[in-house]
Image (cartoon, rainbow, N blue to C red):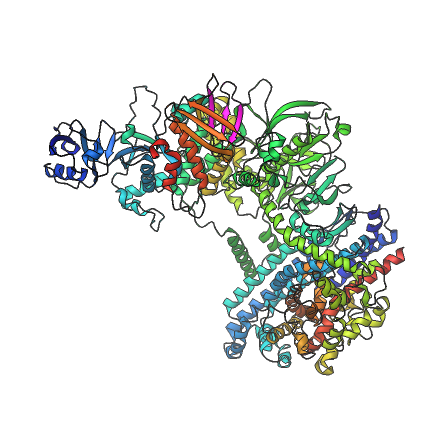
Amino acid sequence: MAAWDLSITVEDLGPDAPPVSLSVMSDLHVGGVILKLVENTPIKRDWSDHALWWEQKQRWLLRTSWTLEKHGIHADARLIFMVQHKALKVGLPNGLTVRLGACFSNPVFQTVMGICTLLNIRHPEELSLLQPVEEKKKKKEKSSTEEILDLTVVPLSTASRTTLSNGIPAHFGGSPELEGIYKALSVPQTSPTPEAIAKQYRPASVVDKAHIHGRWLDSSRCLMQQGIQENDKLWLRFKYFAFHDIEPKYDAVRLTQLYEQARWAILLEDIDCTEEEMMLFGALQYHISKVSQSEPETAKSAAAMDDLESALQCLEVKMESEGGSASDMLNNMTAPELHDYLKIFRPKRLTLKGYKQYWFKFQDTSISYFKSKEESNGEPIQQINLKGCEVAPDVNMAAQKFLIRLLIPVPEGMNEVYLRCENEEQYARWMAACRLASKGTSLADSSFQSEIRGIRSFLAMQNTSSSSHGNAAAASDENINTYSLVSPRYQKKYKTKQLTPRILDAYQNVAQLSLVDAVSRFLQIWQALPDFGLSYVVVRFKGSRKDEVLGIAPNRLIRIDLGVGDVVKTWRYNNMKQWNVNWDIRQVAIEFEGNINVAFSCVTADCKIVHEFIGGYIFMSTRSRHKSDQLDEELFHKLTGGHEAL
Amino acid sequence: MLECDHFPFLEVNIWQTLLTWQHGWMDGLKSSSAPDFKVKVTAASPNMPGNTKNKMTALSSSFYALGVKQGILFWGTAKVTHMDDIDAMFSDLLGEMDLLTQSLEQETASAPSSAPSSAPSSAPSSAPSPAPLPPPWAPSDGERGADRSVNSAELNASLNELEDTDLDALMADLVADLNATEEKLTAQMGGLNAPELPPPAPSSSSGGDSPVSSHSPALPAPPPQSSKPSMEEIEAHIKADKIKVALEKLKEAKVKKLVVKVRVSDGSSKTLMVDERQSVGDVLDNLFEKTHCDCNVDWSLSETNPELQLERTFEDHENLVEPLLAWTRDSENQIHFQESPDKYEVFKNPQKFYLWKKSKKALDDVKDKDKEILIKENFCGTSVMVPDLEGVLHLKEDGKKSWKPRLFQLRASGIYYVPKGKTKSSRDLVCFVQFDNVNVYYGKDFRAKHKAPGDFCFVLKHPQIQKDSQYVKYLCCDDARTMSLWVTGIRVAKYGATLYENFKRAQTKVPHASAWAECIRNQSESRVANGHAPEAPSSFSSSSQEHNLPPAPPPPPLDQALPPPPPPLGQALPPPPPPLGQALPPPPPPLGEDLPPPPPPLSGALPPPPPPLGGALPLPPPPPPLGGALPLPPPPPPPPLSGAVAIPPAPAPPPLPPPTSKFGVPKPPPLLPTKSKPKPVPRQRCSNLPVGAEYLPAPPPPLPSGDDSPPNFLPPPPPGPHLGSGPPPPPVAKTLRPAPSFKSTGLPPPPPAGPGVLPPPPPPPPLPAPTAATIPRRATAGPRGSLKKAPPPPKRTTPSLHGGGGGEGGDFMSELMRAMQKKRDHVN
């Protein structure tokens, strides 16, 4: 057997170094080639992560025991000897970019697993990488030096599930910088500026959305094979909208990134929602960013106990001082009250009297009012129970108008009552009380104080936003522009003045939520949207002459008329008998129960992507709670790999 | 009309009973310090006799306001009462505490020398303090348990009852409930006062360990000395505990209760008491037991509003009292107990809702597996999915008579419509309604009432709106299927995962319940011949109405307790009598005798009170008996014990007749001493019966042991009365039966009869606990003189227990019922 020359480029020698030429025989196995190569290279280093990449065939020669012949390598082959793990810039759902070491030689599925392990995201099968959308080339990108968090110092091999005492994964515990990065990953970002939202690419139509879904990388092939080079940027996104076993305790990063992805989907109108829903999303975003900024308060757990304790203390103090009657004390313990002079107006009554001042008393869940403070021990003029009523704010800081609009249900319908407060402070207290009462909780509830704080901060928000109309200067960092909470459509539709009260309105229902609850709530509402979880692909059905859209959801496929946007047909996976891809003519054929056969070719995406989506969702549905830790990689490849898996 | 006729009577009776009873109680509580009660006669039924009204007003010290709606007795003001009392109690307590602290200071400052003497007692003092507390709590726990059992007992009892009987039972419930509350309050009072009793406490504790007799002497002395021993920390702790208990009770006392008349789909009706904390599911459980239906998941409670022609099925997790409170006073709304196939159809055939666009045939063919998948997808994920409904519905325009078609869409966040000329895209949708504050109702016959374009209408409105107004949204669908889709879809959107949880819970009831129903059916069949046979045998000649009374007799209770075992019943019945005799040689006979002559016994009974429980039963003055009942318990025991110690207590019997007056006397000073005495009693029991918690089980064993063993249980006697009156409010409230059943269980005979099936015993356990707690206090209520003697009571406990304790409770009830019946007769 004759020896022949094999030329191999060694990356580490520099781009300009000539290839190393080795004299080999065809029966030499790849491992032997590498050994020879290393011996002939002047550099001394750890070569264990290096492997041979066959450029023409776009293949890694990872089977080192195979001979050159078996690999089919001849003298004309140009091989490159390089590391398998290279730096990759990964754009995360929250907009941050992380630079980390990723595997370029294994299938993307495994690469993603590695990245997720590093980032501490469970269930990596739900995520994948996609090519980013080109930023609008305005070429004047002076500030394009976006911040990159560098995680390349963390060796992949050390990534582990173990966490330090402060909840940070062990591999992030090395330095303050790393801890800072972990925090950036696991805590929701503050709201973006309206300009930032406007700058982002926004899909304008279903077709645009379909194009985005054409960018997913093939999970059965490696990064090198898909033309990704070192230091390229890819997006890491949740691809399959079937989120398994979310556990806030372990899923800090996962939940946060999921929330960010959802938030951006809504802000960029990637998923449609109604105005009411948008306001609620806005309120939740506001709340989440507020809560996530404030230091985590851990002591809130025993609120009820605290109440009792303090009540007891108060009782004892009183006993010692012998002051006050027992009934007074009882009242103090069981039902704190508000009382003050307020003005009341009942728009329904045909009177011209306008606002009239009375002495108001707020007790338990009802308001009673008296002619004056002196008469407050007698029978009230009226007592109004606020349980179940609707409370709406009507506030204008500039005009110093602090109105609480109450819509109180009575057997005959709803009674409208307006309460007018004198100042911010008074308003905050009474408004908070009204809101709690409408939900059936009394002032004694521990949430009263936080409710007041929430109202105040929102008032402050309105204050700055309305004043910034006059002078755009005074916008402190603490106050959030409500424009940053809604999509550009609503930024255009409403002035801040109109938007703020609406968000405030929605906010009252969520103001009590903890960070995790608020995030979960956000995700729930997102998941309840009718279009949730749909990934679109423009396809052409067999026998049809026009393009249509195939929507791929976690449990079904839908056929959408491109022109009207109506759903024409729905097929559920559990009625599916089989699906096949004809790789030659690039056609997907699916058979459903009842002899229903569907076939289509894909226009905006490779049929491998569609195949992977369908297979992927079926794989997701096979996961069970019990073996949630054990990822059945083989099954995934079987379901999604296509002909390459065979 | 039936109800109309009935209620006035009921009302009158209740009134009288309650008022009188209240009197007694108030006095007993010495709460006269806070007598600002108001009498509100909120409802004047047309049939109400004028004199009753007068009577009612005359009894101005009562604070109960009874509102009678058609089918609903409004019980709301009860809380007011309690509040007032508690206020008073609190001020008492505080005053006492002040005294205490003062005395403490003095002592600590002035007399270090006293320390040694106090030292011994101090140790016990810590122990006693916990002891008093547990009682108040224990009862409440026990009550819950008792509840269950009571219900099961009820089951049988109500089997053959007509509505009248039902009412009677209800009355009994009511009274019992009141008693229970009272008991609780007294218990609480005891707990509250306990702090003042630091001295007594120690002594009592010691008493617990040592024979009662030794204990007794200590009692009188305690008050002064006790203060010394206390260590401040312990004191503080005790205080804190007491206050916690008190706060808890305060909450308890605020609970609203309603008496509801429920129309059953077979045309009959049931009346039951519902308290604020009960969910519709709980009430359904009750009704299942009362009606012996098949308990399938379709059974539901629904409310109808004739004025708006609406009907809505309550969801199982909903609170029942709340919507009822929204009814207007003159409301003709009704509650129905019926099968509503729509209620859980979405879980039985999810495809009908989630795949509604498919053809009907395709939907019928859906496999069970696919249904499961649908449910899993839509209800078991992180977010509940709402069926994607969309379609044209007719909307009645606000304030107009015309209906306009609109394209509506259901989303999780509400119902939207597509404005004219706009697309269906989400961003263009206009919100029609969100679900936070509205409920969905079926409309009936809107074609006539509102000129609706079709017959299938539903309505969205705030639950509190009871009359037509612009805030009521009327919608009309083309067909029944569409209507069901929308109404169900709205419910899914509004209630989310809760709906599924309700369904799962409802399902769990089915198998068990059906088995239960099976048993009942068998049983009822076996009984068919003689209807009330089981209950009647005891020599009950009275009409169905009297059935309530039967519970008092031991035999009937047995049946009730053993509903499941039909055969056992027969056996059980016969045995009960004999066992009684054996176990409680003295008591059994009296019981039987008392029962037969219910009416007369009252008067007659009084004289012989001490020996037979019957004495307690005599309740001629129903209301007073409560108060009187307390004292009574002691009396019965005395006889058995043998004059020695017990006899002194004997005085108790006399108290019975004039219970109210007596209360007045004891009120002021007695409290402390009395309490101390009572405490010992419970303790003893505990010591006697190793298993505190398992009191109930204990009863059966006594049987075998024979007459002697019973003595240990004696403590129960006092409980017996209490049972009826209050510590275990829940049980009592449920029915008279509970008391009887308890007795029966307590009596050796019953348990043996249907041991296996008789899990019912559970009810009994609660009883003991409460009794223990309450007894002491009650005792205090009694005459002072007797109190001192009280120490002996513990001993007598054993003998009297069987006859006295159990019997009394039941008898009292029966007496009450009889009295009521009498009145009714008079009225008639």
> On the rendered structure, is B414 left or right of A168?
right
Q: Measuring from the top left, give residue B371's x and y in whole percent.
A: 57, 39
**Range covered by the magenta-colored residues:** A547-571
Decide which of A87, A469 is in the foreground and name it. A87
- State the image quarter where residue B151 is shown: bottom right
Residue furthest bottom in the image: B644
Residue A155 vertical placement versus A493 (above, below): below
Decide which of A264, B110 is in the foreground and name it. A264
User: Total number of numbered labels?
Assistant: 0
Q: Is residue A638 visible?
A: yes
Residue furthest top in the image: A545
Decide which of A283, B23 is in the foreground and name it. A283
Q: Measuring from the top left, give residue B409's x and y in whole percent.
A: 59, 28
- Classify the position of the N terminus of chain A by image quarter: top left
Residue A281 vertical placement versus B297 (above, below): above
Q: Measuring from the top left, give residue B66's x and y in whole percent.
A: 77, 51
